[in-house]
Image (spheres, helix red, strand yellow):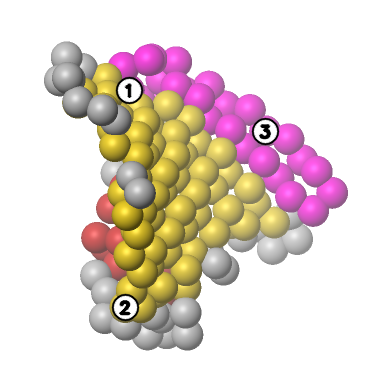
Amino acid sequence: GYFTNQIKQLEAQKTSLIKTAFLNDKQETKTLSHLNWQDEFALFINSDINRIAWINSYSTDSCNQITQKHIDYKSLDPDLRTQEIHVWLDIATQQLDSLSVRNKVKNVFYTLDEKLYFSPSKGYIINAIQKARFTPPDTMQITGQFGK
């Protein structure tokens, strides 16, 4: 539900996005003003671990610091796509400060290692390494910086 609310807020504010994509050694940057935020946040939304079937599939650990609360979720099953989620909350406001996600897929055809980072005040970063059988790995990074 968090990203659904984030999408509504970004749409209401007509937020633009400075998006930079890197694929291996190539780079492209665009400023986008009309976005499908559902598509922009699809990897984050698909990393949701809040499902009844997975109620005992993740360990949870938390730590309170002076200004932040840190919550870690780690998969107990190496076959689950979402392996880790790290959440940082502002203690004073109880609002999300940032989150990171680690997704992994491994099968006979390819491996994929994704690292996702999101900050509601700044934007997101997606790093991925994909390796198909018999080919060199592709390294990808997508950054999205929120504009006005």
Q: Looking at the rendering, which quadrant does residue 75 occupy? A: top left
Is the residue marked by circle 2 packed among few (<14), some (14-19), or many (20+) residues within 10 Å?
some
Going by the numbered disc 1, the residue's amino acid type is Leu
The residue lying at 44 percent from left, 15 percent from top is 76
Please give the range of residues in magenta. 52-80
Q: Looking at the rendering, which quadrant does residue 77 occupy? A: top left
Q: Looking at the rendering, which quadrant does residue 131 occupy? A: top left
Distance from Cα at disc 2 to Cα at disc 1: 33 Å
Instruction: Tell me: 138 left or right of 135.
Output: right
Residue 3 in sight from this viewpoint: no
Position of the N terminus, as image quadrant, is bottom left
Residue 41 magenta-highlighted: no
Q: Position of residue 80 (x, y in %)?
A: 32, 23
- Front-most of residues 73 and 50: 73
The residue lying at 26 percent from left, 28 percent from top is 136
- Front-most of residues 107 and 97: 107
The residue where tag 2 is placed is: 32
Q: Earlier in the sequence, mark 1 or mark 3?
A: 3
Q: Position of residue 73 (x, y in %)?
A: 52, 30
- Front-most of residues 127 and 40: 127
The residue where tag 3 is placed is: 62
**As displayed, is residue 114 above or below residue 131?**
below
Name the residue at the right extreme.
66
Going by the numbered disc 2, the residue's amino acid type is Leu
Badge 3 element: strand
Q: Are marks 2 and 3 in contact (CB under 8 Å)?
A: no
Badge 1 element: loop
Q: Nearer the viewer, mark 1 or mark 3?
A: 1
The residue lying at 50 percent from left, 36 percent from top is 85
Going by the numbered disc 3, the residue's amino acid type is Ser
